[in-house]
Amino acid sequence: MKNIRDKTKAVRAGQMRTAEAEHSDPIFATSSFVFDSAEHAAQMFSEAKSGNIYSRFTNPTTRAFEKRLASLEDAQFCSGTASGMSAILTLCMCVLKSGDQIAASRGLFGSTVSLFDNILRRFEIETRYYSPAELASGQISADTRMIFIETPSNPLCEIIDITRLAQVTKGLNDCLLVVDNCACTPVLQQPLALGADVVIHSSTKFLDGQGRAVGGAVVTNDADLAKAVVGFLRTAGPSMSPFNAWIFHKGLETLFVRMKECCSNANTIAHWLTDQSLVEKVHYPGLKSHPDHELATRQQRDFGALLSFEVKGGQSAAWKVIDSVQIFSVTANLGDAKSTITHPTSTTHARVSASDRKRMAIRDGLIRISVGLEDVHDLIEDLECGLNSI
């Protein structure tokens, strides 16, 4: 199966059929595994032999998901984690030390900013934020040990040139390029093929696609890094549960179909929003007016299902729109079959300081939507009702 194509990988990769000859992948709902003897147990714990030991770090269901996602990212190694945020924390704990610096794109998800600024700073790990242009020009500190980006960013859909950043990273000593691929998934973008060292996923989002479970993943081709990640999970324990792994594993089977439909719906909605008099600006890379449209066309296979738009009237107007919709779910999650809507300033980025939000260009009138699988005409009518409430 080495030469199978991506759509087939999404359905078939990672499956390890048991002696029961099941067609659908099983859930190994067990905390521990049994050894043949005391000597066998000792060999397993000393890593003289490989196999299942304890579900905090070895479980067949989790391993099946990891292999399938790694296959889709064209990677050798993947480790599932308890959440997307725990994936980022795990990576940072494995590669950074006191005195190191992170160079981050300025448009990061609010929780990632809080992790970098409030948690890692306690360990004297400093994060500096840069615009995409500053990153691309290499205007970052020589002490940088990690470049961390989201592309497209959440919620403004800024696109960052991964190939260019890979060149910048090579010019730095012992630095990793890390790409949060949550918005695109490997269906639309494969960062490792573009030169990234690590891919981060929140499998909670599009990989699941139905908002059923929380999880994350660290994906890489670096064997030493992958070993360090497994060691951290084994000791610290921010691990993915087998049940959640099974949900994500099954979610990947429909990922290509779902992303195609969600992208099509989002593209239609974005173009409709540009014609609305109460909308000041639409942030969607599928629009030719988007400053990164050409880069997105080269770097991605499609433009994604995440978009945001700014309404006239600030927060009060944005809240009126959100309170008036009936189909969109008012929730901060994204990547669901059900379309969602939220006000970033007061939800996902509420813990980001006002000055930082200003630096990130996240204004009070901004509304973020994640487009799902409903009929696009119903979604447009719902948004029209919301805009009419202003």
Image (tube, rainbow, N blue to C red):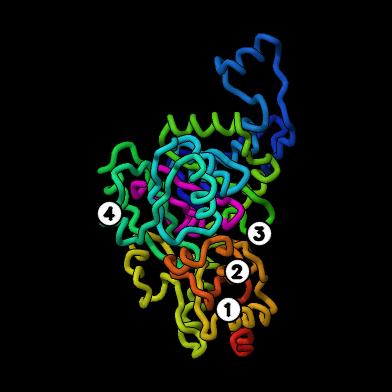
Q: Is residue 80 above or below residue 316?
A: above
Q: Position of residue 327 (x, y in %)?
A: 68, 76
Q: Are marks 1 and 2 in contact (CB under 8 Å)?
A: yes
Q: Position of residue 257 (x, y in %)?
A: 55, 61
Residue denoted by label 2: 346
Closest to the observer: 324 or 299?
324
Residue denoted by label 1: 315
Closest to the observer: 218 or 142?
142
Q: Residue at x 51, y 59 (%)?
A: 109
Q: Is residue 192 visible?
A: no
The numbered mark, 4 or 2, whose residue comes first in the sequence reads 4
Q: Which mark is residue 334?
A: none
Which of discs 4 and 3 lies nearer the camera? The answer is 4
SS for dot 1: helix
Q: Is residue 298 rendered magenta in the image?
A: no
Mark 1 belongs to which amino acid?
Gln
Tell me the CA gap for discs 2 and 3: 24 Å
Mark 4 belongs to which amino acid?
Gln
